[in-house]
Image: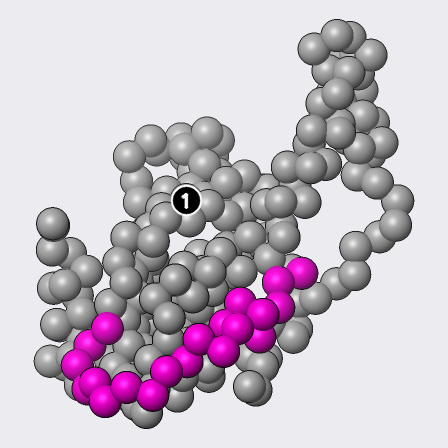
Amino acid sequence: MKKNKAVLQVMPSRPEHGIAPLMADILARIGEDPSREGLLRTPERFEKAIKFLTSGYESDLDKIINGALFSVEYDEMVIVKDIEFYSLCEHHLLPFFGKIHVAYLPGKSVIGLSKIPRIVDMFARRLQVQERLTQQIAETIQQVLQPRGVGVICEAQHFCMMMRGVEKQHSGTVTSSMLGAFREDKGTREEFLCLANRTR
């Protein structure tokens, strides 16, 4: 399997020194006492949390797919909708979260359905912007499957807009990436949008 360029570009090695001592220093610099009872283990907890939230940098696409590509004669749209995700905005290191809808038109094969949310997590668990996240998911599925088209819609709320800055609590951001038939064929695109927005 040919690896997505987007996957290869962001694979920094993690430094050997821990994050916890740096977090203890940050707590002191904002005026807190890192030695008080409630904060004694906070640096270690933060280190574990941030490593989990950025674990996508260490994800291996081949291991995620794990051979789950199947030759199936099926030429209608496959859609996995309402995939929950959580990510960190690279500008403020604050969370953004929401749901992602992924659809594709099979070429010669289909992919195991559980692999699509795993691909979403691989890119969501990095420092991100919503636009890039949406595009990386679409491009990876296009490269892995070589389908006739891929569509990805991402709906998210951003804490960097809700907790600070403009402080708008109910604003949302929608991004999309349409490749192949989803970009070229208006009917295919409209079918995807209709299915993605349909309530159960």
Q: Position of residue 96 (x, y in %)?
A: 45, 44
Q: SS class of the residue under badge 1?
A: strand
Residue 139 visible to an observer of this rendering:
no
Task: Bin the neighbour count of mark 1 within 10 Å (Cα to Cα): few under 14, some 14-19, many 20 and up.
Answer: some
* Residue 53 point in image, percent of width and height: 59, 45
The residue under the point 30% across, 40% down is: 171
Answer whether residue 182 is visible to the viewer in this image. yes
Q: Residue at x 44, y 57 (%)?
A: 130
Find residue 126 and report its horizontal and vertical position in percent: 59, 54
Q: Is residue 74 magenta?
A: yes
Residue 97: quarter of image? top left
> Along the horizontal axis of the image, is 10 left or right of 149?
right
Count of residue discs: 1
Q: Residue at x 45, y 36 (%)?
A: 159
Vertical placement of residue 73 versus 133, above or below: below
Residue 151 position within the rendered picture, expressed as x and y whole percent measured from the top left: 29, 73
Residue at x 67%, y 61% (from the top left corner): 58
Q: Amino acid at mark 1?
A: Phe
Closest to the observer: 74 or 175? 74
Along the line of sight, the residue nearer the viewer: 108 or 97: 108
Above or below: residue 21 compared with residue 119: above
Q: Which residues are magenta?
A: 58-78
The residue positioned farthest toward the bottom in the image shown: 108
- Above or below residue 15? Residue 137 is below
Q: Quadrant of residue 37?
A: top right
The image quadrant that residue 117 belongs to is bottom left
Magenta-colored stretch includes residue 136 = no
Say which residue label 1 marks: 97
